Structure formats: C-alpha cells, structure tokens
Image: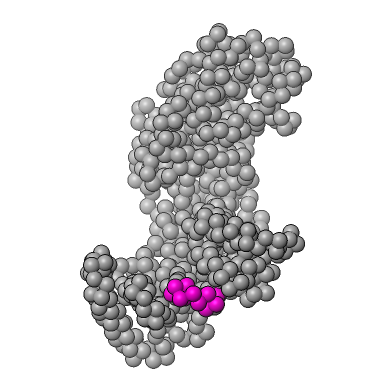
Amino acid sequence: MFDFFRKKGNNPEEPAKDGGSQNAAGATASGRTTRDALAEFTATPLPDAIDGLLFRVSMADPTDPTSSSGFDAYAARLLSEAEAPSLRAIAVEHPVELRRLNTTGLFWSIFDDSTISAGNRGTILRIESVLDRLALISKALEGDEGTAFVSATTEGACSELDWQVLRSIANDANDYLTAADRDNKLDTQYGTTGTRGGNWDLSTRLAAACEAMVLPFRLEYRFACDSATGTIVASVSLPTPDVFPKSRWSSATGQWADCTVQRPAAAAAYALRLAALIAAAAFGTSVGVTRVVVNGREGSIAGPTVMSLEFGRIPFTMGAMAKIRSGEFSAPATECDPAALFDMLHLAQFAVNIDEAGNLQPVEPLPVELSVPFTPVAEDTRPLPENLRGLLHADIVSDLDVMSEQNADLAARYRAIMEEKDDSLLLAVAQLEDIVAETSAAATTDVIADDLAQPAEPRRLLYCENVFARYLTSLVESDPTVRYVRASDIGQAARSSLSRIYRDMGDLDAAEAQARACIELAPTSAPAYNDLITCFAEGDHYDRIIDVARDALRVAVTGNDIAYVYYRLAFAYWQTGRLPEALACYLRVPETSPMGEAALRERNDLVSEMGNNVPGSDWDPTACLRTAGVPLAPLDDAMEVVGRALIELCDANMPLAAAPLASLVASTQRNDILHAVAASLRQGV
C-alpha cells in the first residue's frame, strides 16, 4: 500500500488551519462538502476518480485545509487498503459503471457478472463497500444540520464513525419488525390482490424490506416464504473479512492501530447483526410468521453456507429485540465479539463453525421442511387452483410447460438442414417440409387421443415462442373448457424457416402460407407474426402490415417484442403516408431496445421529411395511436391475466410456475423489489 498518510507529516487528528473542525466559518469558506466529495466518484470514470483522490491526498499541503481533508484522507486510506488502484486494469477488460441509488443514497457498481473472475468481482465490491461506508460516514457527519464541510472533518473521527456504522446495522430492526401493520403497495397487481399473510404478501413485503436496508456492504439475497407453516427461509450474502477496516484510529494512543487480526471476528459479528436484521424483516411481514431461518453465504449469494440460524418468533421478539432496543447489541465492545452477540440472539437452532482465527467455516444449512416445492414445471403434476384452470386452459402445473426439451434428435436434424441449406435451397425445402409433416401428424394423433379420453375438454395445438405466451390463451380463446397440447418447437421452427426460404426464392405466396400457419399455431406469441409482416414488406403491402401488427400488439407483453412490433408498424405507417402515426410508433421504441438505434435513425429521417408538418408540443402521440386503433401494449387485459395468474400461483405454493410472470411484471414496472421476488420464486434458497 502506498503510504501517503505520512506524506508531509500529516497528523490525522491535527485540526484544520484557522479553527479546525470546530471553526464553522472556516469550513464554510472552503465550501466543499462530504456530498461533493462523494459526487466526484460518479462525475468521472471510477478509476480516474480513485487515482485522482489518491494523488491529491498524497500531495496535500498540511498547512492548507483546502488541499485535502480528514474525510478525503480516510477515503484514500480505505481505497488503498481495498487495492483500488488495481481497478483500472480490471475496467479495461470489464467496464464498470458506478451509480448512486436514489432510494438509499448508496453506490451500486454495474458490471457483467457472467464474464468476470471471482477475484476481480471481489475487488470491485470491496471498492463499492468503501464508497458505501463513506456515504454512511457522510450522513453521520451531517447530523441534523444536513451539511458537513470536508474541512471540518478529521481522519480519526471518520474512522470512529466507520466502526459505528458497522456495529449499528441492526438498529432499525424494530422498524422492520412492526411493518406488518402497514399497507403493502405491491400486494395488488393489475386488479388481483394477494391473500393477506399469503406467500405473495410475505414475499413482496420481505423484498421491499431488504431493498430498503441501508447497509455498508452489498446485500444479495434469496428467500422462500411458506405461509402454510409460518416459515421464511432466507439466504443472504456475507462480507468476507478482507473488506473490513485494516486499521483504525486510537484516540487513547493518538496513533493508527493495525486491526488485521480482528477482521475475521468483525466479519462474524457483522454476520450475526445482519441475520438479526433479516429475521426482524421476516417476522415483520406477518404475525403468522413464527419461524425464520437465515443462511449466510460467504462473499456472495453463490458462496458456501458459513452460518445457518433458526429464530423463533417469541424468543426473538422478547429476547433479541430487547438487546437491540437497549443498545447492547450495537455496543462498541461487541464490534469484534461475535460470542457476545450470539448469546443475545436466543436461537432455536444453529449451525456455526468458527476456526481459531475467528473465520466462519462452511457448514450444512439447517434442514427445513416447506410446503412450497420447487419442482420443475414440466415435472409438477399437482392440480392448478380451480379458478385458474379455465383462465389458463390447463388442469395441472405441467400443462404450462413450454420450455423443456422435446426431441433432441429432431432438433439436431433441423440444425443440420439449416447449416447446409445454402448448398441447395430446394433440398432444404423438401427436408423442412418433411419435418413439418412428421410433427403435424404426431401432434394430430396426440390431440385425437386426448379428445377421446376427455371429450368434454376439446384439445388444440399451441406453440409458444416464450414462456409468457402460454399464460395468455384466454386472450384468443373464450371457451374455458378448451385445453392446449404443446406443439412441436422444431415443427414451428421448420415452418418459419420455410417462410424465409420461400421469400428468398421469390415465392411470396408460399412464404405467406407458412407464415400464416405459424400464427395459427402460436396466436399468443407476438414473434410468430414477424414472418408474415416481413412477407408483406417484401411485397410492399404495407397496409396489410398494419393489420397484422395490430394483432401482434394485442398479445405482446415483453419489452423487446413490443418494441419490435412498433418499429415495424412505424415504417408501415410511414410508407402508407400516415406520418403522425408513424412518428407516434417510433416514439414507443426505447433507444435501449435491440431496434432502438435503427428506430432513432428512421425517426430522424421521418421528422426531416415532415418538415413544417411536425406535430407541435400540444400533440399527444398516445391519443394519436388510440385514434388510429393501434393497441397500446402491453394491453390491460393481458396484464390482468398475468397479475391474476402470478398471485394465485404464488399463493398456491407453485413458485416456479409463478416466477416467469413475476419477472415480466417486474420488467414492465421496472421495479427492483419485484425483480427480487421473481429471483426468489425462480431460484429458491
């Protein structure tokens, strides 16, 4: 570590020139606040901001309070301990974007988690935790005044506040524990309200609590809520010892003390405090929750379990909470004393193993029996809730499966055809026609057999381009007795490929026939309409594209599907001379979508063509589309089906069937709480 702390004889506790930390006038004169200092980390690329701070502190003139400050010096100390200068090499290969969250005021590092090594990920999160702790120190410095000038800060005071932050994370536990009395704004989705105290209510309440927690280290979590047994199991990430302060200021000696050996104990103490906070939030979801199990994972949610604690409601609310409220649980003496904290928690069961150095060691999670099975949808033969069967045109959970592999040999055969199709389009057509015929014959046989077995429930074939399409059958079929048989994925792929090949060969009639067959088999899948749209575009039948695109928008629910259809519809309106409608459609294509850049270029060209006829500021593009009869996707009736199925499946202990719908609702609303619920429904603990 570059030792800039002794540069030019800096004393971390030396008062600033002209009055030091007590001179408000001098502080105000410098003007720079701790908030300003934190804002500098997002004003430039993070590696530049870090290196700039380290350089400025190393070159600071101790006689000039405006050249540096205690806050800056402590920031530099922590960043140096976190090996922050190594971030630049990481960021070259793995871009890192730093954002400040409006909800908590904390920092969030954005990077591609799928391509980065565990070591580099750890470095990024160490730096993120330093910035978060600085943000919490800043908040403590501000106090009731709301402003803290950096020239009024000392490095030693920042160190003391840092440890205060670390030991006080459970202080808000009572607020979370009493949250069941408050309204749950997420309990109702698109007209359907979850049962109070049911799985959906518990899940959204717990996720909301976790998202609201202001913590010095990133919290990753998953949970399973079982209202039937009154149990919540939560898995949470625990910070590793190396992210805790390596040194601290000692007021008694007037020196910095090395606390490397205390880091494991500090990490273990933090883990127990976090477990208490999570338990309070879980018990606070409903008075019906009587048991909470918290599993701590080392480093990340994917790390090994190093702590498993079971809390009972009464021992926790009467015992542990008394210690938290009294302040004993956050006393300075407990900063590195997990044994003292452990005794305060009054646990029902636990699995913890701490080595001689104080490090938490891997353990087996406590066994917990839940009535919420995470059985794959394709294997789940439980009956669906009675009032969902007609809506979803399905009787058992596995009827909703459209994602499991069907025929690996047929899929390999199809891929081989497509790889060699350029050698002979006619041969490829013949081979694809064979696949279509084979899969159609097999599907017809299945439908006939099902009809004979259940004559009161007519069967129909259905292909789903994505998992969401399976839930939307009531949009195209009003008879609740109809049941759907899954069509062949490869058969549908063969039809779509035939349509494209026929287009390439100039046979637009044959291409249209195959495209219409795709729609007939997949009426709830917006992408199924794309081949017909493209076919009409090849023939310059833009007026016909408008009708097809309207039909597609009635079932489009994902952001990318919606954006693509509006993109194609915009161009069709442009080519038919309906320029305001075209502009209105282009405006509904987000620039971040796959078609965003193309849509923006075309929109700019359209505006240039419109010239003086560009609509004024009082023009309402939404009203323009309504007048033109263009659906505003996602439609209310589609999302009402999604909301009803989501909540009722969740409350019926069918998390994997509900999970895709939770993801869709979360993406539609851009809601982090719902994304967390979706992840827990999908992955469990």
- Total marks shown come to 0
* Image position of 39 with respect to 403: above or below: above
Spot occupied by residue 289 in the image (x, y as percentages of width and height): 53, 56
Residue 368 falls left or right of residue 311: left
Spot occupied by residue 330 in the image (x, y as percentages of width and height): 57, 32
671 or 318: nearer the viewer: 671
Spot occupied by residue 269 in the image (x, y as percentages of width and height): 48, 33
613 or 92: nearer the viewer: 613
- Residue located at (42% from left, 91% from top): 456
Residue 611 falls left or right of residue 386: right
424 or 239: nearer the viewer: 424
- Residue located at (50% from left, 15% from top): 4
Q: Residue furthest right?
A: 25
* Image position of 472 with respect to 324: above or below: below
Dominant SS of magenta comes to helix
- Residue located at (47% from left, 38% from top): 96
- Residue located at (34% from left, 91% from top): 452
* Image position of 97 with respect to 189: above or below: above
Is 389 one of the magenta-colored residues?
no
What range of the chain is rendered magenta? 535-546
The quadrant of the picture occupied by the N terminus is top left
Residue 537 falls left or right of residue 195: left
Spot occupied by residue 556 in the image (x, y as percentages of width and height): 52, 69
Look at the image and tell me whether residue 83 can be seen. yes
Quarter location, residue 11: top right
